[in-house]
Image (cartoon, rainbow, N blue to C red):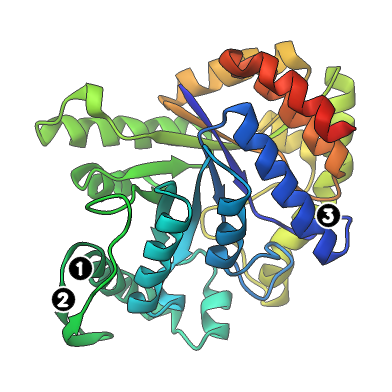
């Protein structure tokens, strides 16, 4: 089992300049603590994400870390020119000395795509074409592609990523049939939603992986993403979650409410207690966290647990304490290091 971080970088209790610096300090802590990867989302025109350019923020994070892997989860491909994005990926991979991971997707919000002048009904076709172009740019000397949305002829490519043939790829899978393509293409996946559905997805992935003749020892990461609040007691952790959740929920739902619509897959309850009861969040003391993470990953068939520690109006100190408790409990090889660095950051 490996452990990572996911961060929406949603609107928090600090001015934006301070929020960026706080997030970078948290990423430094994740690096020192021994988490595998810090993943960040891409959203636009919404308080759900105040770092709408993942590449810019990841470039800064790469200079503040040494071991932690970094990546967008996901780049919204229809919102990017594929050649430009391939160049950014190459730059980031070298700036991080080969620590970039690349999530790809068409975008979860039709409203955000519409703001960019992209017809949401065309987004899937654009995503497929853009992915093909990006993979050519990362792995070949020229890009030659003739599609409906993108056309390139004999475009020379001088840059290649540090990780050859390309950095590891990630794909968010909301339904079991969505696991087929990433399994066939050796792509890591991340899942949200109810545990039974996550288990259907991971089972389907393993079945497709085996059907392709692949060894189970080489299985990609099958991740489950959950909000996590850790504190000295279950009561304190729940109180923190209840206080922070309304702000996050408001940011998450702002565009959907503006347009009178609902998310297709990622539907969240209005209250934190229901989120915990549904298994979308874990809140508690170190013992509760340890037991629930173990049970959840077994039931989900996951081999990678992704925590979202920062959300809503949680303070920097509250997030750092939560992440520190989690790391000391779940990352035993890093316990001494985490204890030391936690106190350094708190001081």
Give percent across and percent down for residue 167. 33, 51
Q: Nearer the viewer, residue 30 or 39?
A: 30
- Give the residue number, with chain letter if any, for mark 2: 142
Cα gap from disc 1 to disc 2, whole angstroms: 7 Å
Question: In percent of the image, x 21 and y 31: which residue is there?
Answer: 207
Residue 280 is at least partly visible in this image:
no
Height in image: 77 above or below 67? below
Cα gap from disc 3 to disc 1, whole angstroms: 42 Å
Q: If you read the primary sequence from the N terminus, does the residue marked by circle 2 or circle 3 appear first? A: 2
**For the residue carrying disc 2, how many other residues have a C-alpha within 10 Å: few (<14), some (14-19), or many (20+)?**
some
Disc 1 vs disc 2: which is toward the camera? 2
Q: Nearer the viewer, residue 83 or 230?
A: 83
Cα gap from disc 2 to disc 3, whole angstroms: 47 Å
- Give the residue number, with chain letter if any, for mark 3: 247
Height in image: 269 above or below 122? above
Q: Nearer the viewer, residue 130 or 252?
A: 130
**For the residue carrying disc 1, how many other residues have a C-alpha within 10 Å: few (<14), some (14-19), or many (20+)?**
some
Q: If you read the primary sequence from the N terminus, does the residue marked by circle 1 or circle 2 appear first? A: 1
**For the residue carrying disc 3, how many other residues have a C-alpha within 10 Å: few (<14), some (14-19), or many (20+)?**
many
- Give the residue number, with chain letter if any, for mark 1: 136
Question: In percent of the image, x 75 and y 59: which residue is there?
Answer: 20
Give percent across and percent down for residue 132. 23, 68
Give percent across and percent down for residue 48. 70, 62
Height in image: 245 above or below 149? above
The quarter of the displayed image where residue 134 is located: bottom left
Q: If you read the primary sequence from the N terminus, does the residue marked by circle 3 or circle 1 appear first? A: 1
């Amino acid at each position: 089992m490996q452990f990572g971080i996911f961060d929406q970088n949603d609107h928090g209790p600090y001015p934006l300049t301070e929020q960026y610096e706080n997030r970078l300090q948290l990423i430094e802590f994740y690096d020192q603590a021994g988490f595998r990867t810090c993943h960040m989302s891409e959203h636009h025109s919404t308080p759900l994400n105040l770092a709408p350019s993942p590449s810019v923020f990841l470039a800064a994070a790469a200079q503040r870390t040494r071991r932690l892997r970094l990546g967008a989860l996901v780049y919204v491909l229809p919102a990017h020119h594929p050649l430009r994005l391939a160049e950014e990926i190459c730059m980031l991979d070298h700036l991080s000395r080969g620590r970039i991971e690349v999530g790809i997707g068409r975008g979860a919000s039709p409203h955000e795509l519409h703001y960019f002048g992209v017809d949401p009904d065309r987004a899937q076709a654009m995503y497929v074409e853009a992915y093909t172009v990006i993979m050519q740019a990362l792995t070949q000397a020229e890009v030659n592609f003739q599609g409906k949305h993108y056309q390139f002829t004999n475009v020379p490519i001088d840059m290649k990523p540090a990780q050859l043939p390309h950095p590891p790829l990630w794909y968010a899978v909301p339904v079991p049939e969505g696991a087929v393509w990433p399994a066939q293409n050796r792509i890591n996946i991340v899942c949200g939603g109810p545990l039974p559905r996550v288990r259907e997805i991971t089972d389907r992935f393993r079945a497709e992986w085996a059907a392709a003749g692949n060894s189970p020892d080489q299985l990609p990461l099958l991740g489950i993403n959950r909000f996590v609040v850790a504190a000295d007691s279950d009561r304190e952790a729940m109180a923190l979650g209840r206080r922070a959740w309304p702000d996050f929920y408001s940011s998450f739902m702002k565009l959907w409410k503006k347009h009178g619509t609902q998310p297709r897959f990622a539907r969240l309850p209005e209250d934190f207690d229901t989120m915990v009861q549904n298994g979308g969040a874990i809140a508690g003391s170190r013992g509760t966290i340890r037991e629930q993470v173990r049970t959840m990953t077994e039931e989900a068939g996951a081999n990678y647990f992704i925590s979202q520690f920062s959300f809503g109006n949680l303070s920097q100190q509250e997030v750092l304490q939560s992440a520190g408790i989690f790391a000391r409990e779940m990352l035993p090889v890093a316990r001494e290091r985490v204890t030391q660095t936690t106190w350094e950051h708190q001081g």
